[in-house]
Image: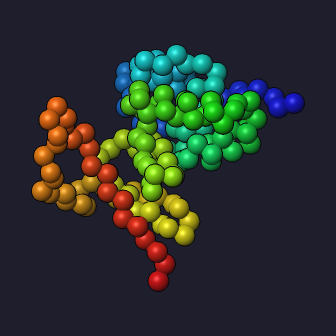
């Protein structure tokens, strides 16, 4: 039977994104800071959210699928279902902690980098690579339909090996 996940208390500084989100309420303990980040986003810091948050945010900016996060959680002995991973990722996205990036309507990535940026998609590996927002200029956007406004524009440039 898998052992429950207990987030390690490492003698390291929390990731920069965590510091920015938690502001002056940081205590230096990454798990405490993660709980603060979840509370500030309006989410109760349940054991499963803290465990998944640790896996997501402790490694810096990254792109991850629900299946890959589930695989990491299972490897870290977090007792969790794939459905709970999906639900938690969507809750984090709705709370503004992640960006959801849909590729071809069949593959969804979750991005911990909330800055204005775009992506390269390496087609043979399905890897996403950040492109700083300042490196792409999008102009002549159509007018949004009545009662709607453009929230953001996501550019995905597909790459293949020569």
Point out the residue furthest to the bottom here. 162
Direction from residue 85 to residue 22 in the image, left or right: left
Q: Nearer the viewer, residue 36 or 114?
A: 114
| Residue visible at 14% across and 35% down in the picture | 146
Please identify the quarter of the rendering in which residue 84 is found. top right
| Residue visible at 58% across and 26% down in the picture | 49
Point out the residue furthest to the front here. 146
Residue 131, position as x, y percentages in the image: 34, 59
Residue 121, position as x, y percentages in the image: 44, 63
Residue 155, position as x, y percentages in the image: 32, 57
Residue 89, position as x, y percentages in the image: 52, 34
| Residue visible at 55% across and 30% down in the picture | 88
| Residue visible at 26% across and 44% down in the picture | 152
Q: Nearer the viewer, residue 148 or 90?
A: 148
Up the image or down, 160 lies above or below 143; here it is below
Q: Is residue 18 visible?
A: no
């Amino acid at each position: 039977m898998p052992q429950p996940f207990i987030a390690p208390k490492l003698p390291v500084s929390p990731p920069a994104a965590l510091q920015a989100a938690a502001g002056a309420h940081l205590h230096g303990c990454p798990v405490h800071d993660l709980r603060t980040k979840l509370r500030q986003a309006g989410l109760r810091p349940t054991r499963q959210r803290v465990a998944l948050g640790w896996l997501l945010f402790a490694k810096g900016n990254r792109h991850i699928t629900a299946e890959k996060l589930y695989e990491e959680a299972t490897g870290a002995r977090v007792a969790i279902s794939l459905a709970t991973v999906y639900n938690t990722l969507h809750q984090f996205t709705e709370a503004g902690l992640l960006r959801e990036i849909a590729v071809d309507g069949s593959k969804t990535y979750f991005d911990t980098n909330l800055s204005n940026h775009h992506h390269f998609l390496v087609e043979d590996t399905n890897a996403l690579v950040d492109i700083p927002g300042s490196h792409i200029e999008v102009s002549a956007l159509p007018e949004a339909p009545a009662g709607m406004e453009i929230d953001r524009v996501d550019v995905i440039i597909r790459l293949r090996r020569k």
